[in-house]
Structure formats: C-alpha cells, structure tokens
Image (spheres, helix red, strand yellow):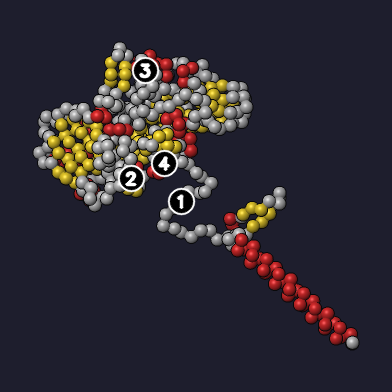
Amino acid sequence: MEKHEMRSMYRSVLLLVGAMVLLIAVGIGLIYQQSFGNRIVEPDFDSKIVVDPSKSQGAPSSENGWRSPFERPTKSASYASASRTPLQDLQGTITPSDLHFERHHAGVPEIDPEQHELLIHGLLEKPIRLTLADLKKYPSVSRICFIECSGNFRYGKREMTPQEVCGLTSQSEWTGVLLSTVLRDLGVKPAAKWLLAEGADGALMARSVPLEEALTEAIIAYGQNGEAIRPQQGYPMRLVIPGFEGNTQIKWLRRIEVTDQPVMTREETSKYTEKVKGGKIRMFSLVMDARSIITYPSYPKVIDKGWQELRGIAWSGRGKVSRVLISVDNGKTWEDAHLQGPVLEKAHTAFRFMWNWDGKPTRVLSKAIDETGYEQPTYNQLVAARESKGGYHFNPVVGWDVEQNGNVFLADVKDIEP
C-alpha cells in the first residue's frame, strides 16, 4: 500500500474516533443537563458539587410569590384553638399575614363575602345592614398596630423560645372604616354607653366594649397588610381596637349592638377576668400593658464571645413605648436600648443594643416603659399585686441566661428582681 493511501486511512480513523468521542461527550452532556435541570454545576475548591445561579435561567414570573426554601418560619400550635407567631424569626415589626397568631373558640369559619352581612342596631336612630361592598363605600383608613391575646404568657422550663413565651402577639397594617364614621351616619342616641360586638363563628364570640374608647380608634377592618384579611384573622371583616386585648377585637364580625351597659356575655364573666389583691376580681381590664422581649439571643441560639447586637420588640396598649432598658448583668445595671423609628402608638417597636460579651455566664434582661410612665413589672411584683401566679394580663420582665459555652436558655422569671 502506498504511503499517501496509508495517510488517508489514518486520517479517516482519527476523524471517526474524534466523531465518536464528540458523540459520547454530547451524550454525557445531555444526560448531565437533564439530571440537573439545565443548571451548570461547577466544583468548588473542595471538589464538592455546587450550583452557580449566575450560570442558568431562573424561574419565570408567577401568579403568587413564595418564600425561599431556605426560610421556613412557622407558627406553633399549642392546642387546637391557638397558634403562636415565631417572634424570633421575624425581620422588622410587621408580621407576615400567614404568621399572625391565631386564637379562636370554635375553629375558623368559611364565609362567602357575598352572603355575609353586618347588622348594626340598638340605641341608634337608623339601624342598618351592611355588606362588604357597602362597607367599602365609606372613606377608608389604615393603621399599624399590634394585637395581643390577654393570656399571652407561658413559662416553666429553660428550653423555651420567644414564640413559646409570648407568641400570641402580632402586628399588621389594618385597613377598613372607622367605626365612628359609620355610627355618626346612624345617629347614636344619648343613652348609649357601650357596644356589643359579635362574630359569626360557631362560638358566637361576643364582647362588650365601652363606646367612648371604641369611637376613638376602632376600625371595622377588611384589609390586612395590603390584602384581604386572612380567614384565620376574621375574613371578611373584623373589629380592630388598637391597644385593647385581642378577644375584644371580634373576628368574622356580624353584629354590633349599641347599648347603655355591658351585656355581660359568657366571655366576660366566666373568662377574661383576673384576680387582684384582696380576693377581688377585675373585669373589663381591656388595655394591654407595656411589655418587651429580647428575641436575639434567645433559646436555642448559641453565641460567640465578642460583640453581639441584642434585638427585640416592645409594645404598650397605652400609647408609645418611650424607653426600653437593657441589663446584661442580671439586673445590677440598666442602660437604654436604641428604639427603631418610627415609634408608633400601640405598636410593636423594635429595639437594639450593642453588647460586647466577655464570655462569662450572665443574664440579659429587657424592660419597657411607655409614655404614660408605666414600667413593665417583674413576675414577683405581679404575683404580689394579683395574689395569682399566672393568668390574664401577665406581662413580666423576661430574660435569657447566657452560659459560658454560649448556649442561651430562658431565665427563671421567679429569680428576676426589680
């Protein structure tokens, strides 16, 4: 065979081998691409397989957004009729609507807004029935405020998160119509002093509220954080009374009766009353007192020696939070925390405090003071005043024990002194 024929055959073999290698590479690439969903996967310096998001097309736009799969905040259900907001996981002071705490007495009803009506009657010149569409014809307002269950305090073990201690409080921007706007059109009679609000749930949850306070700020709300109120929060409408205990802010609102005295419903006789000193029972203690909690560091976090930013929230149903005091030495000394603005009335207020931890065991505490001068009490002060070790309107100073290894646990509230 001549030399040029051998060269030609050699070139052909090389081309064939090259083509086969190329086909194998393409095949592997297709399998690789199919397996990893069109993502480019590159090894890092540890030779682990990682995904570089800058090398692939992201997800298309969608009808509804979603959280990152790396963020999984959830409410905790302590029993069938309540679930608690993960205060330690929130960023800022507005609670996402799906994380707003729940408290209901007969489950969450499913209500068709087209079939729902609000009856307003009693000591009025012109009683009325309003649909949701009718309500939306009135001038609207929006208000940022917290809502808190009056029984929002738990303790008893070291392994408790802020969510477990006092997660029955949340904050939203509520949108609706001022109750005063509606009642002004209906003509309130001179004898009117109270109103009864009633829900459309299976328990017919109902509470009496002083008319003067209700006319000041109460809202018949249909919006929450820019959307319709969630069913767990009272869809299609609820009563919002900034600063009052949560059970007065009736969800699934179906009736308001203007009266000359409290109706003394089941919920304000057998429940939502508390003992005070001398064997007496306090009723209609509607305003939520000043309170605070450090949400970081808190159980089950582990911190390192050095600078830490203590973070938390404070609130008061009496008005604005004026100060939050921080102690990083078990109450021996106190310093002012920084309040994040805007500081709103009857709203959760974020506070921060820079702390250079020396690595020694200690206890960190927070104490809220509102604009009326009310100072958050200790647990022992509350027990002395109430002759009770728990119940409604318990708002004690809460703290966290930081151990030498950086572990953080809930402090025993009974050991916290003024």
Crowding at mark 2 (Cα within 10 Å: few <14, some 14-19, many 20+)? some
Q: CA distance from mark 1 to mark 3?
A: 45 Å
Dots 3, 4 in contact, CB < 8 A: no
Amino acid marked by disc 4: Leu
Residue 78 can be seen in this image = yes
User: Is residue 105 shown above or below 23?
Assistant: above
Residue type highlighted by circle 2 = Pro
Q: Residues within 10 Å of mark 4 (few under 14, many from 20)?
A: some
| Residue 250, position as x, y percentages in the image | 27, 37
The residue nearer to you, when weighing 300 against 144, is 300
Q: Do residues under tags 1 and 3 come within 8 Å of each other at their CB atoms? A: no
Q: Nearer the viewer, mark 2 or mark 4?
A: 2
Q: Position of residue 233 (x, y in %)?
A: 33, 41
Badge 1 marks a residue whose secondary structure is loop
Q: Mark 2 and 4 residues: CB-CB less than 8 Å, in contact? A: no
The tag earlier along the polypeptide, 1 or 4, is 1
Determine which residue is flagged by label 4. 99
- Residue with the mark numbered 1: 66
* 3D distance between C-alphas at marks 1 and 4: 14 Å
Point 39% across, 33% down: residue:
168
Determine which residue is flagged by label 3.
Answer: 388
Name the element at disc 3. loop
If you read the primary sequence from the N terminus, does the residue marked by circle 2 or circle 1 appear first? Answer: 1
Mark 2 → mark 1, Cα distance in angstroms = 19 Å
